[in-house]
Amino acid sequence: MSIRSRMSQRLAGYRKAGKSGQGMEQALAQVKGLFTRQGVREYVFEPVRELVLPAEPTTDARVRAVITQVALSNAVLAGMPGKLGVGVFVCWALEAWMAVTIARNVGVRIERPADALKYLATTGGAAAVITSGFGELVSSTASLLSFIPGLSSVAVVPAELLVTNFVGVLFWIGFKEVAEGRNFRIPAETIGGAWREALELARFQGRALRRVASRENVRDTRDRLVAWIKGDVRAQRLAVTDDALVALAAADLAAGETHRLEGPVGAAFLESLRAARPQWAEVEAGELATLFAELPEPEAAELASALRAEVLERLGDDGYLAPYAGEEDGVVIQVSENGELWALKVEDFSAVEGLEEALILHAGAGPVLAAEAAEDLIDADQGVSAVRGVLVPVEVGEANFDEMAERAESTGRSAIAGGLGVASAVSTVMSLWPFAAAYARGAITRDQLGRAFGIVLKSSGTRVAERVAGGAALGPAYLWYALARSVIALTDGALREEEDVAEREGKDGPA
């Protein structure tokens, strides 16, 4: 089949996908974890990690990374006999979630992933014009892809990489139009830029694959992808303590990030705060942020900590919180005092923002296990302990310091690479908390605290560690607040600096 025919067939398939009902919904559920769970992405793509992680925390880098993830997934599936039992719905679902993620990164929200493909399906009538440049793509990238172990013997693989790249770039262009207040469209004047972007992506992928790919790790990537899609492996979720919940909300408020507190968790926190301080009962969120930020930090931390029970009670009264019963989705909240687990019900990740989004991302950072072992307890030496399938960090001490520091580095690096602003800070805060708590208990030295923070936060680690260490005697409430506020401010500021650099350098994606 020619490249042009393959692209035309893809666009025609999108029109069918919207009418495929249960088959499409099931496929969307199967592949969802690749786009909503950091732990699943790390598991599936670990053999070719260099290829699929964003090169920098910018919107353009994140969009190119998700296009590459889906292009590689389609390529390894397309090159296997019978696609190992993985049907066409899965390929459509991969591209639908790719569209949702691209839209989200450029500021457009799609309520239902199943609706995503209909946007590009409307361009089907222009397929001949859109696909007129595929010949250049094939000839320009064939040599780069021709010696990749495990892929080069299958002619359909380069075609799948190229088609998926171009589909992703078209979504990118169309959703940027929507973000700027226009209808989804592919303006004729952008086609040249789309070809150039798709060509650059294919060249990057070819070079990277030649560096990192071997027959073994291409096969491993394929096997892990199929195992996740078919349910042979399952992802554990990380719990969030009530201490952390209120500390993160308080840190957002103190930072003036009131737009991040417009969801159910933020609303429960603000109402609880107003109830605790009657003089603030009628104060709007913006002024409340100013008043809260003016409090001495120990007082702010203690005030936030005292709200834990009321915040959970309000969430329960509003129907957002229920006893945890092993549900696949949602965020697990663990009560610090008695270890009880509660399930926080939030909307699908594609339709939420702010603190809830950050909590969902953190919950999805848990490891992937074989299905038959997913409910078993995990040995504490691996750095986690399990409570009914939900993972929570173990205590750090001299015996496991190096292992936990290495795990924290991995979590922090993935969060920063994800580039989700304040949302990515949540995983960083969670990965550093065991070290702050260990220092407060006297289980590790101040030097070790600085080393651990430096591993994750690099040059800023020493400054944050000093602040946390200086307040260790003030108790866990202050530790949570100081750590959350420091990391959120640091991550948000660093990303704003990255965005300023990108804007100055004119990195605006496809023209």
Image: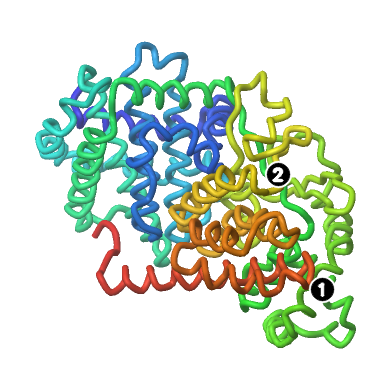
Q: Which mark is residue 302?
A: 1
**x and y, in percent, of residue 82 in the image:** 39, 12
Callout 1 amino acid: Glu
In percent of width and height, residue 332 lies at: 74, 46
Vertical order, 162 against 351 (above or below):
above
| Identity of the residue drawn at 78% across and 60% down | 243
Dividing the picture into quarters, in which one does residue 158 lie? top left
Element on which disc 1 rests: helix
* Of the two numbered discs 1 and 2 in the rendering, the one whose residue sits closer to the viewer: 2
Residue denoted by label 2: 394
The crowding category of the residue bearing disc 2, from other C-alpha atoms within 10 Å (few below 14, some 14 to 19, many at least 20), is some
Q: Secondary structure at mark 2?
A: loop
The Cα atoms of the two marked residues, 1 and 2, are separated by 25 Å
Q: Is residue 111 in view?
A: no
Residue nearer the viewer, 342 or 442: 442
Q: Residue furthest top?
A: 81
Query: Is 89 placed left or right of 6 in the picture?
Result: right
- Across and down, in percent, residue 322 comes to 84, 46
Please indicate whether residue 142 sits to the left or right of residue 187 in the image: left
Q: Quadrant of residue 272?
A: bottom right
Looking at the rendered image, the quarter that the C terminus falls into is bottom left
